Image (tube, grey):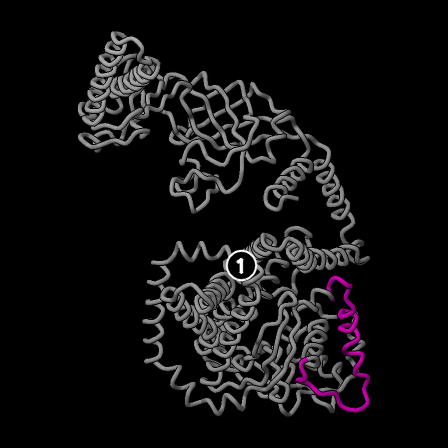
Amino acid sequence: MGKTFSDNWYRIADLRLGLRPTVSVRLHRYRNEPWYVLHERTHNSFHRVSPATWRFLTRLSVDARVDDVWRESIESDPLETPGQEDVFQLLSSLYRNNLIMIAGNADEGRLLEREEQKKRKPLPARMSEMMFMRIPLVDPEPWLRKGMPLIRLLISPASAVLVLLLAGWGLVELIGGGSRAWNQAETLLQADNVVLLYLAIFVAKGLHELGHAAMCKRFGGEVRTMGVMLLMLTPLPYVDVSSSWAMRDSRKRALIGAAGMLTDMVVASAATIVWANSPPGVVNEIAYNLMFSTAIYTLVFNINPLMRFDGYYILSDLIGVPNLHEQAKSQFNGWFRRRVLAMDDSGTEQKTPATAFWLAAFFVASNIYRLTVMLGIVLFIADAYFGIGLLVALALMITTFVTPLQKAWRSLTNPYFLFQHKLLVRRGGFALGALVLAIVLVPVPDNRIVPGVAEAVRLTRVFTEGGGVIRNMHVASGSWVEPGTLILELDNPELDIELAGVSAQIVQAQLMEAKAISESGVDQAPLQQRLETLDELKASLLKQKAALTVKAAHAGYWLAPESDFRRGAWVQRGAELGQVIDDRSHRFVGVIQQEAGAILTGADRRALEVRFEGERGTLYPAQNLTLVPHSSETLPSAALSPLAGGEVAVTTADPSGKQSAEPFFLLQADLPGAQRRPGVDAVRNGRSGWIKIKLPASPLAVQAWVKARQFFQRRYQV
C-alpha cells in the first residue's frame, strides 16, 4: 500500500462512481500471481489490477461516496486496501480509459484536473508528440472476418514448414551474394532511390501489421483500428491488436507479437531470392529495398526486447511481467530514491532482490541501446543528407534529453523536495558545480594513440630489369645476406639471341665502314651513326644480361615468399622478386587523419612510446617525430586495414587492402630501442602497432570539442 493520505483526495472524495456495465473481467496469472484484467468492449480499453485493488473496485457503487467506500475498506482490510494517492491514480486512469461511470451531476473535471495540468506540456514535449502521433483511419474487423478461411490456411503447420524452407533458401542466397549486398547498400539513400526505399518500407510495414492482425483474429481477438502513425514525421501503417491482452494464454499473446516478424521473414526471404536471381534494373532495386528494410527493421528494432517493439512484448508475455518497461523503470527509480535520495520508497512494488536487480538492469540496458540505435540512425541519414540528419538529431535530442531533463528539474525544484533534502541538494549542487568547473577549467593529460607499422630504415625492393627464367636460387628466403651476395640468377635465351644478332650487325657495320674508308668519296656519316646506335643497343643488352644476376645492394634479410613457386618460371620485366631488409634499425610509420594532423604541432616529440601487436607488454621509446607534408590514400601496409585486424577503413574495390577510404597523413618516428641482431631475432618489419603521442594538457571540455570538430570535418567536411 502506498501513502495512506493524499493532497488530491478532496477531488474524488464526494464522487459516486462504479465500473461500467460493459466492462468484463478476466483472471490472468503472471509468474503464478493472480491479476484481474478489465476490458471495456465499446472503446476496447484495458486495465490490469491486483486482487487487493479488484476487491476495492467491487465495493464501489454509484450509491456510495468514494470516501465512504474507502473508509469501510480500510476498517475491514487495512493492510491490503490501497492508499488515497493510489486510489486517486487508479480512478483517474480508469476514467481516462472509459472503464468507470460517474453518477449524478458531479463535477467530473475534479477527477481529471490534475491530469489536464500534466497535459499542459512545454513546446518541446508537444513537438515530440507530434512526431510520433497515431491517426486511426478504418476498422479492419469486417475484412478479417471475411478472410478467415485464408487466415486459417496461412497460419497452419504446413505453412510454417514452407516458411522455414523459404527462409533457408533466402539465407543461402544472401550468404552467396553478401559482398554484392553490402556494396549496393551504399546507394540506398541516393536521391533516385529514396522514394523507392520509402515505398518498400511502407509496404513491408503494412504487411507486418497485417501479420499481427491476422494472428490476433486467428486466436479469436478483434482488430478494430487500422491507421497511420507518424514515426519521426514519416507516415507508416499500424493496427491496434490490444484485444490480445484479454487472452489468458501467454503463448498466444507471444505469437501475436511475433506474427509481424514472421511476416517480415517471409517478405525478406522472397525479396532476397528475387534480388539474387534478377538482373540489374527496377525489379532488382525493388527487391533489394524490400530485403534491406525488412531485415534491418526486424534485426535492429523488432526482435530486440530492449526496444519497445515486438520483441519487448514477446519477452513480457513469456516471462509473465506485463508493463515490463514501467516495472523496470519503477524499480530503478525506487533504487535511486532509496540509495541516492534516502527517501521512503514504500510506494514501489516490492520484488525479490534478484528480480529487482534484473529489472533495473533491463531499464539501464534498454536506454543505452535506444540511444545507440538513435545515434546510428542520425549518422546513417546525415551521411547522405546532412541537413535532414541535423533535424532528426534535434528531434531525438528533444525527446531523449530535453523533455526528461525538464521533468527532472521540476521534481528537483519542488518546494517540498527542497525542504526535505536541503543538505542533499546543497551537496549535490556543490558536487555538480565542482565537476563542471573541473571539466571546463582543469587541464588533464591529453594523448593520441595512432596506428601504424614498423618499417626497416634500409629496405630495398628488388625488381627485374629484364624478363627471364629463374635458373638458380643461391639464397633461401629469410636468410641474412651481405652486400654483393649473389641471390639468384635468371636466363633469357631471347636476350642472348638478340645480343648475338646485335654483335653480328656491329661486325657488319664495321666492315662496311672499313670498305667506305677504302673507297674514297663514300659518305661515312650514316655508317658511323648506325655503328654508334648498335653500340648503344649492345651496351643496353649487356646491362640487361648483367641484371639477370641479382646481388644484394646492402646487408639484410632476403625475403621472397613466392620465389620457390617461381623457380623455372618466366618472370616479366619489372616484376618484384623480393626485398632486402636491414632489420637492425627501424622507424615507426603511423597513419593519422588529415584533420588531426594540426594537433601534432604542440606534441612532445621526445616523449613517444610504441607498442607492437604480439609484444604489447614491451614498451619501445621513439624519437624525432616528423609529419610527411602531403596526404596519401595508400596505406604503408595492409596490416592496418580491418581485413587484417587494423583500424583504418579501406575501400572494398581494392583487392590489396591498402586503399584507404579517406586521405591521411603519414608520420614517422625513429625507434632506437628496437635494434635487432641479424640471424638471431625474428624480423619485425611490417608488424602493426601503436604510437602514443603526448600533447599539452588541456581541460576535458576542450579535448571533447576538438574531437567533435575533427569528427565533423572528417565525416561531413564542415
Q: In the rendered image, which residue does mark 1 sit on?
A: 362
- Disc 1 packing (10 Å; few <14; some 14–19; many ≥20): many
Asked if residue 170 can be seen in this view, the reply is yes
| Amino acid on which the number 1 mark rests in the picture | Phe
Which quarter of the figure is the C terminus placed in? top right
Residue 311 lies, in percent from the top left, at 49, 67
Q: Position of residue 707 (x, y in %)?
A: 63, 39
Task: Label 1: state its secondary structure.
Answer: helix
Of the pair 306 and 197, the residue shown nearer to us: 197
Q: In the rendering, at what x and y percent does residue 7 appear?
A: 79, 70
Q: Where 237 falls versus 390 (above or below)?
A: below
Residue 250 relative to residue 389: left or right: left
Q: Would you identify the image quadrant in which residue 148 lies?
A: bottom left
Residue displayed at 66% across by 50% down: 340
Against 336, residue 685 (above or below) is: above
Q: Residue at x 62, y 73 (%)?
A: 229
Q: Is residue 189 magenta?
A: no
Image point 50% across, 24% down: which residue? 668
Q: Residue furthest front?
A: 521
Residue 360 in view, yes or no:
no
Q: Relative to 99, say whether 456 is above or below.
A: above
**Magenta residue span:** 97-126
| Number of numbered discs overlaid on the protein picture | 1
Q: In which quarter of the view is residue 548 placed?
A: top left
The quadrant in which the N terminus is found is: bottom right
Lateral position of residue 495 relative to residue 555, left or right:
left
| Camera-side residue of 310 and 634 | 634
